[in-house]
Amino acid sequence: HCVKMLRNAIMCAGDVSVITHNWQKGYEVPIANFKSIHARQKWNRIEDWRSAH
């Protein structure tokens, strides 16, 4: 039951958007910029891209 719910959540919300990281003064590591635009994709398009590459 739980595995099926996780699988459905991943497949229904496929997001291949890039999350950039920026250096910020006062931090020792880059900080993720979650303000980037996200676009859900159809799972079969993600699978097709993966197979081609």
Image (tube, grey):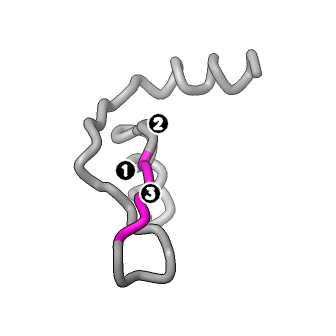
Mark 1 surroundings within 10 Å by alpha-carbon count, few (fewer than 14), some (14 through 19), many (20 or more)? few
Q: Amino acid at mark 2?
A: Val
Residue 51: quadrant of the picture: top right
**Structural distance between the alpha carbons of marks 1 and 3:** 26 Å
Q: Please state which of residues 34 and 45 is positioned toward the viewer in this rendering.
A: 34
The residue at 29%/55% (across/down) is 34
Q: Point out the image quarter for the N terminus.
A: bottom left
Q: Secondary structure at mark 1?
A: helix
Up-down relation of residue 19 to residue 51 (above or below): below
Bin the neighbour count of mark 3 within 10 Å (Cα to Cα): few under 14, some 14-19, many 20 and up: few
Q: Amino acid at mark 1?
A: Ala
Residue 21 colored in magenta in the image: yes
Residue 41 at x, y = what percent? 39, 26
Segment tinted magenta in the rendering? 19-24
Q: Nearer the viewer, residue 6 or 15?
A: 15
Residue type pointed to by label 3: His
Which dot marks residue 9?
1
